[in-house]
Image: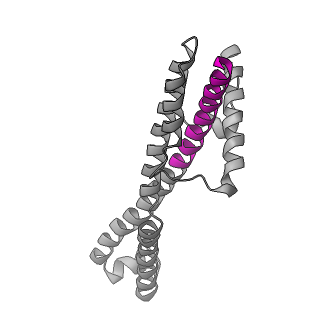
Amino acid sequence: MSEDIRTRVEGLKKRANLQASAHAMLRDHYARWNGFLTYAALIPTAALLLFPLTTDDFVTSALRMTPNAFKITNAGIALAAFVAVLIQMVWRPDSQAKAHRRAVEHYTSAKFEARRLLESDPVPTDGAQRLEDKYLDIQGLPAIPDDRFLRLKQRHLQKIELSKKLDVNPWLKLPGWFRDKP
């Protein structure tokens, strides 16, 4: 009976680790998009504030544009900034990043609780049940989309294997998709 409980807790720990890792990747994905959309709205908007200060002579001589072409360019920049804000308001990547951050905290907490329980011998039945209840209490947490789950699981498993190799050889060259991130 005790080995059955230990196996159940080990399985929960492994699944919680996968869930935390997958939600962390989604959190980072949405946070990057939010940053990109924020800058895509702010930078053109700031540039548009400078444009009323330009004269037709400056536009013609320095920018080598006709005044009408300059106005059309202004309109295009304003439209691009507006579209970035609109996408941000409808898609709400900041809210999605925050929701996935809560999921990371939830599953990380479950993983650490499982690790703590596995240090006991035998694993307490009531502790295993509390952990299972905690793991399954996902009310208000975002789901991982089915079409992204396998890719996220693959990245998680690659991360684990790469971590094991780094333990043996800390000078190992990282693959490109791990290398450029702190």
Give the residues in magenta: 1-28
Which residue occupies the extreme front position in the image? Answer: 1
Which picture quadrant has residue 17? top right
Q: Quadrant of the N terminus?
A: top right
Residue occupying the far top of the picture: 121
Can residue 90 be seen here? yes
- x%, y% of residue 132? 54, 35
Vertical order, 62 against 140 (above or below): below
The answer to whether residue 23 is above or below residue 82 is above
- Image-based side of 47 in relation to 143, left or right: left
In screen coordinates, is 132 left or right of 154? left
Whole-percent x, y for residue 71 in the image: 40, 84
Q: How is the image coloured?
A: one colour
**Residue at horizontal 54%, vertical 25%?**
114
Determine the main secondary structure of the stretch shown in magenta: helix
Q: Looking at this view, is 91 or 37 the one in front? A: 91
Residue in the foreground of this view, choosing between 118 and 154: 118
Q: How many marks?
A: 0
| Residue 57 drawn in magenta | no
The residue furthest left is: 53
Pick the front one: 63 or 145: 145
Taking the spot 63% from the left edge, 34% from the top edge, the residue there is 179
Residue 14: say if magenta: yes
Q: Nearer the viewer, residue 56 or 101?
A: 101
52 horizontally vs 169: left or right? left
Give me the residue at 47% from left, 55% from top: 96
**Residue 181 in the image: x percent, y percent?**
56, 37
Quarter where residue 72 is shown: bottom left
Is residue 171 in view?
no
Residue 172 image position (x, y, % from top left): 70, 22
